[in-house]
Amino acid sequence: MYRPLVLALVGLLMAVAGCSALIPSPQIGRWELQTVAGVKAVFPATLVFTNLDVSIDTGCNTGAAAYTLDGSKLTLQDAAFTATDCGGGALTTQDGAFRAMTTGANASFSGEFLTLDMGNGQPVLVLKRGAGS
């Protein structure tokens, strides 16, 4: 009498466990730069996260890295960037802020926004989820 109920419950639990693998991680997708150190970004820049790596476009240089996200700690591994001279000013500052992430950053997801800081709680990069992500 209980056997069909137990089998149904086990099947339901297995289905739910299988579905959890289909729920995307919050970082997956395209993120578009909004501000750098509290100042509105003047140059378009993006982060594009997949399950395994992140593509980086600083607005001046491009790069890629494997990454881990452990709680709120974002760590990039083996980051590689192009080495174009950004010409100084805001673009160089923006490029440097993205490169600083390679040492590790705290990531905070709130609605459509991703905020990255270097561990001091002061936002360095604020990005908004891109269309279609």
Image: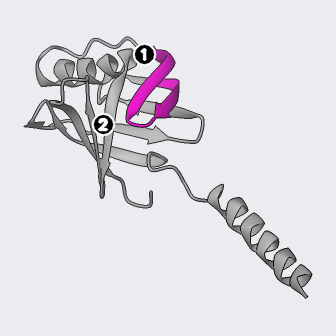
Which residue occupies the foreground of this view, 50 or 69?
Answer: 69
* Local SS, label 2: loop
Report the residue at 47% width, 49% height from top. Answer: 29
On screen, residue 10 versus residue 3, left or right, reads left
Colour scheme in use: one colour
Is 61 rendered above or below residue 29?
Answer: above
| Picture quadrant where residue 132 is located | bottom left
* Local SS, label 1: loop
Q: Residues within 10 Å of mark 1 (few under 14, many from 20)?
A: few
The amino acid sitting under disc 1 is Thr
| Picture quadrant where residue 102 is located | top left
Report the residue at 43% width, 37% height from top. Answer: 71
Q: Main secondary structure of the magenta part?
A: strand
Q: CA distance from mark 2 to mark 1?
A: 14 Å
The amino acid sitting under disc 2 is Ala
Is 54 rendered above or below residue 90?
Answer: below
Q: Could you tell me if the residues under marks 2 and 1 are in contact, i.e. CB atoms within 8 Å? A: no
Q: Which mark is residue 82?
A: 1
Pointer 2 residue: 45
Q: Which residues are magenta?
A: 64-81
| Picture quadrant where residue 38 is located | top left
Expressed as whole percent of the image width and height from the top left, the position of residue 44 reads 26, 39
